[in-house]
Image (cartoon, rainbow, N blue to C red):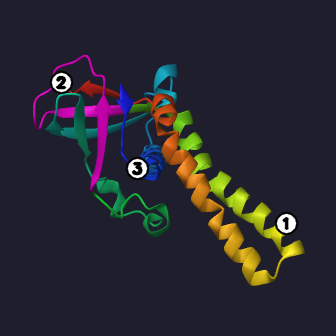
Amino acid sequence: MILKIPNISHLLVNIINLTLQNNSLQRMKKSMTESFNTKNRFEIKHKGYISKISENAITVSLKGNINCEGCKAKAACGVSESNDKEIEVFETNQAFNLNESVQIILEKGLGLKAVFFAYVLPFILLIITLFVASNFLKEWVAGLLSLSMLIPYYLLLYFTKDSFQKMFKISILKNY
C-alpha cells in the first residue's frame, strides 16, 4: 500500500505528526508488554476509520488523540492542533467498508526521513545559501535569495513525489 497525498509537504507533515503522536503515546504507557515483540518496536500504529472509498484509493480518517488534552507539551507537539488527518492508501488487496475501524501502520524510520526532507534539509539549504550569499551581496538581497532557494527545493519535492510515495509506504489493517 502506498500513501498518496497530492501535496508532498502535506504528506511529510502527516508522517511527522504520526511519528510524534506515537512517540508521546509510548512515553505515556507504563506497561511494556509489547516491547518484547521486535516487530512492534519498529512500527507506528494509529487507529482510524474508512471515510471514503474510490476505485483506486481508500481514505482513512485518523482518530484524534485523547491523551493530548492532559499533556504539558501539547503546545509544542503539533499533534493536538488538528483532529482532521486523512491519509489515502493505494494498492490495497483487502476489501473495506465505509466507516470501518482500521489501523494504519508505517515504519518508524519513515518519520525521521520525513522530518529530514520537510525541515532539516530545507533549513540547511537556507543557512548555506545565506552565508555564501552574504559574502557577495547585500544582507537583504542575501536573505531574499536564501528564501527564494526554497522555491526550487519544494518544486523538486513536488516533481519527485512519485518516488516519495514509493519510499513512504503505509499498510492498512482491519480491526477485529
- Which residue has dot 3 on it? 7
Q: In which quadrant is the C terminus drawn? A: top left
The verdict on residue 89 being magenta is: yes
Read off the residue under disc 2: 176
Residue 56 at what x, y percent from top left? Answer: 23, 28
Q: Viewer-proximal residue, 37 or 89? A: 89
Is residue 58 shown in magenta? no
Amino acid type for the residue under numbered disc 1: Val
Q: Marks 3 and 2, how far apart in space?
A: 32 Å
Classify mark 3: helix, strand or loop.
loop
Q: CA distance from mark 3 to mark 1?
A: 30 Å
Q: Amino acid at mark 2?
A: Tyr
Query: Dot 1 corresponds to which residue?
Result: 132
Query: Residue 145, relative to residue 59: is it above or below?
Result: below
Of labels 3 and 2, earlier in sequence is: 3
Left or right placement of residue 11 versus residue 50 in this view: right
Q: Point out the stretch of residues depicted in magenta.
A: 84-104
Q: Which mark lies nearer to you, 3 or 2?
A: 3
- Horizontal side of 59 relative to 160 (left or right) equals left
Q: Which mark is residue 102?
A: none
- Name the side, left or right, on which 124 lies relative to 18: right
Screen quadrant of the N terminus: top left
